[in-house]
Image: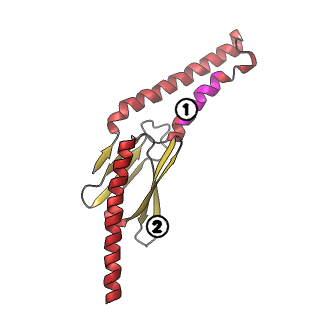
Amino acid sequence: MRLSNRNNKPLFSFIYSLVGIIFILGVIAYVLEISKFDVFGKKAWILLAIPSLLFLLLYILGRPVFEYDSDGEALNFRNNHILYILARKDAKDEFPKYKLLKFNIINVFVFKRLYVYILSKKNHIVILKYDINYLSKKQIKDLKFSLNKVVKANKEIRHEHEDNTVAV
């Protein structure tokens, strides 16, 4: 199954550009307010606070472009940002399906994140994190369905392997 919101990239670019323009206009309005006009008085800080909060919200929402591919024998995850200024760390992970142990989706108000638990070569559990704020409800439902299918298949294989080991 393939899942991607890359086709919304122009919308994301527009939103980030709009917030950037609002931020620049807020700074200009603040400078003009304190040097020339004095319309807001002591509340001129609002001209900087509102655009800064919008910018902070976009930063907290994380990387907007998410791609998932479960076709074949491997799972592919890509999560990247459209602005290099905000790019904390783009995530590109590919691993065999049998390494997937479980996953967890955290959904708190405006914050959605996918945690994927995989088994490393040294039998340690590695947690991979992906921002899924910009996925629709249907896309999240499809992602859950696909990952549940892989986890269920892996549990059956591990259970069969344990039964064969005990029988020997």
Task: Give, as a three-letter code, the residue at label 1.
Answer: Phe
**Counting other residues with Cα less than 10 Å from the Cα at mark 1, is it few (<14), some (14-19), or many (20 or more)?**
some
> Which SS class for mark 1?
helix
Q: Earlier in the sequence, mark 2 or mark 1?
A: 1
Which range is magenta?
47-57
Asked whether 33 falls inside the magenta stretch, the response is no
Which residue in the structure is indicated by mark 2? 125
Residue 120 as seen in the image, left or right of residue 106: left
Residue 161 lies, in percent from the top left, at 32, 78
Q: 120 above or below 39?
A: below
The disc label shown at residue 164, or none: none
For the point 42% across and 27% down, which residue is it? Answer: 14
For the point 54% across and 40% down, which residue is it? Answer: 60
Q: 139 above or below 146?
A: above
Mark 2 and 1 residues: CB-CB less than 8 Å, in contact? no
Residue 134 lies, in percent from the top left, at 42, 39
Asked whether 49 falls inside the magenta stretch, the response is yes
Task: Give, as a three-letter code, the residue at label 2.
Answer: Ile
Q: In which quadrant will I find the C terminus?
A: bottom left
Q: Can you tell which quarter of the image residue 42 is in? A: top right
Would you say the magenta stretch is mainly helix, strand or loop? helix
The disc label shown at residue 55, or none: 1
